[in-house]
Structure formats: C-alpha cells, structure tokens
Amino acid sequence: MKRTYLAEEFIVLTDVVLITCVVQRGMAEEVVQVARQAGAQGATIFYASGTGVRERRLGLLSLAVSPEKEVILIVASTDQADRIFEKMYQAGKLDTPGMGMIYMSPLDKMATHVPKGIVERFAH
C-alpha cells in the first residue's frame, strides 16, 4: 500500500507481525541466526533485566533464573511468521522453565525503506 507524506511517496506494509522473544543473556545471536534461516530479514536485539526476586528457583531441579535477558524483535510477513516463531521457540529452548518467552503481535501498519525492485515485483 502506498501513501503520500510531505510530497514523498512511501510504502506502508500491512500484512506483517511483530515477533518478540525474550531469552537468557547470551542466547540471542543463535536464536536470530535460526530465525534468519527460517526467512526473517533481520532483527533488533537489546538487553533487559527482569524484575522481582534476583535469583528464583524453579521446579524440582531448583534451576536458578538469571534476571539478565536479551529481547529480540523481528518484523515478519504473515506468510513466514509461524515458521520463524516455531524455529525461534526451539532455538531459545523456551520449552524449559525459566528460559524465556515468545509472542507475536499483529501490526496495523509499518513503514521502512523498500527497494524499488521489490516494489515493482509486488506491484505486478
């Protein structure tokens, strides 16, 4: 979808989702690599710290949960989102208690630079 803003034309993408993944510190690079192999075009990683008890023990094994986290943001087309989401879940070992979480949110619209060749390919 094209929009005009301040006499310049730009592309607004409407068929995209935001995948947000919170993993243990040191895991983000591997999770992003797997996401890219699954079709993600790129990712944003930032560092965060959890709140609450500094060292919390989970389950029978008394696993310590570190408050230091990495947050990964990926914008993906709805066609590729489920595959990327699943691969990120597996790579982050999110089926293990205390390893993190992942969620997907629909985006009403998103804008960024889209190369002319890609615009022309999808315009036909």
Image: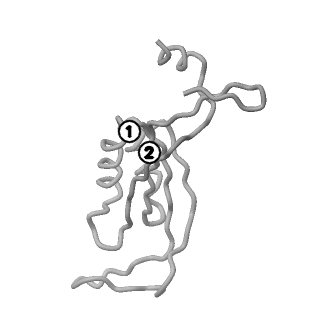
**Looking at the image, which residue is at 55% across and 49% down?**
44
Q: Is 27 displayed left or right of 5 in the figure?
A: left
**Badge number at residue 17:** 2
Q: Tell me the quadrant of the picture where the N terminus can be found.
A: top right
* Circle 2: element type: strand
Extreme residue in the left direction: 60
Tell me whether the residue at label 2 lies in contact with that at label 1, contact meaning CB atoms closer than 8 angstroms.
yes
Q: Position of residue 4 (x, y in %)?
A: 69, 28
Extreme residue in the top direction: 124
Position of residue 13 relative to residue 69, above or below, is above
To which quarter of the image does residue 82 belong?
top left
At label 1, the amino acid type is: Thr
To which quarter of the image does residue 36 belong?
top left
Along the viewing direction, whichever of 65 and 118 lies nearer the viewer: 118
**Looking at the image, which residue is at 48% across and 76% down?**
67
Q: Position of residue 63 (x, y in %)?
A: 32, 80
Q: Position of residue 87 (x, y in %)?
A: 31, 47
**Badge number at residue 45:** none
Position of residue 120 relative to residue 19, above or below, is above
Q: Position of residue 80 (x, y in %)?
A: 35, 37
At label 2, the amino acid type is: Val
Disc count in the image? 2
**Looking at the image, which residue is at 63% across and 30% down?**
113
Residue at numbered disc 1? 78
Position of residue 94 relative to residue 109, above or below, is below
* Circle 1: element type: helix
**Looking at the image, which residue is at 43% across and 85% down?**
55
Number of residues whose C-alpha sits closer than 10 Å to that of mark 2, classed few (under 14), some (14–19) or many (20 or more) = many
Earlier residue among tags 2 and 1: 2
Between marks 2 and 1, how big is the CA–CA gap?
6 Å
